[in-house]
Image (cartoon, rainbow, N blue to C red):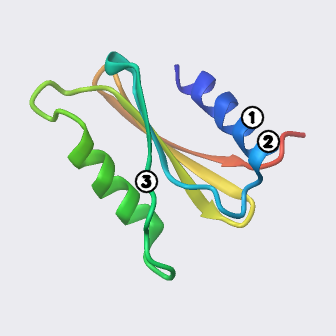
Amino acid sequence: MIEQFIAMTHRVIEEEGFEDYLPTLLRPQRKDVRVLDGIPEGDDIESQAKDWAECSVDEDEDEDFILAFKADASHFKVVARVNGINSETVCDVNIA
């Protein structure tokens, strides 16, 4: 599931570019994808995106989620909770 989300993120970046990439959250049980818009320039994207994701999922149900956000000019980070297991992965924007 995480690898599929990373592949989807690469496709979006190929089509739309990376400069204005917005944090994207997948809640697979709900078949719901959301994009976070409106983070003020200069704010810490990682903490804002993680806070947004935490507020968007059902913590009582330990709901699965996968979140991607821009880490720097050439990487995005994927933070996930799938089947109760938390993970973080940094991905290159360009696929070699």
Residue 72 screen position, x and y as percent? 65, 66
Residue 6 screen position, x and y as percent? 63, 33
Q: Quadrant of residue 84?
A: top left
Under tag 3, what secondary structure?
loop
Outermost residue toward the bottom in this view: 42
Residue 66 screen position, x and y as percent? 44, 34
Q: Nearer the viewer, mark 1 or mark 2?
A: 2
Under tag 1, what secondary structure?
helix
Vertically, is 54 above or below 40? above
Q: Name the amino acid type tagged 2.
A: Glu
Residue under circle 3? 36
Circles 1 and 3, Cβ within 8 Å, touching? The answer is: no
- Does residue 56 appear to the left or right of 4 in the view shown? left
Give the alpha-carbon distance from disc 1 to disc 3, as whole Å: 18 Å
Q: Which residue is at 75% across, 60% downward? A: 74
- Does residue 65 appear to the left or right of 58 in the view shown? right
- Looking at marks 3 and 2 on the same chain, the residue that comes earlier in the sequence is marked by 2
Q: Name the amino acid type tagged 3.
A: Leu
Other residues around mark 3 within 10 Å, as few (<14) / some (14–19) / many (≥20): some
Circles 3 and 2, Cβ within 8 Å, touching? The answer is: no
Circles 1 and 2, Cβ within 8 Å, touching? The answer is: yes
Q: Name the amino acid type tagged 1.
A: Arg
Numbered circle sitting on residue 15? 2
Residue 11 screen position, x and y as percent? 75, 34
Which one is in front, 17 or 43?
17
Give the alpha-carbon distance from disc 3 to disc 2, as whole Å: 19 Å
Residue under circle 1? 11
- Looking at marks 1 and 3 on the same chain, the residue that comes earlier in the sequence is marked by 1
- Does residue 52 appear to the left or right of 3 in the view shown? left
Other residues around mark 2 within 10 Å, as few (<14) / some (14–19) / many (≥20): few
Vertically, is 79 above or below 74? above
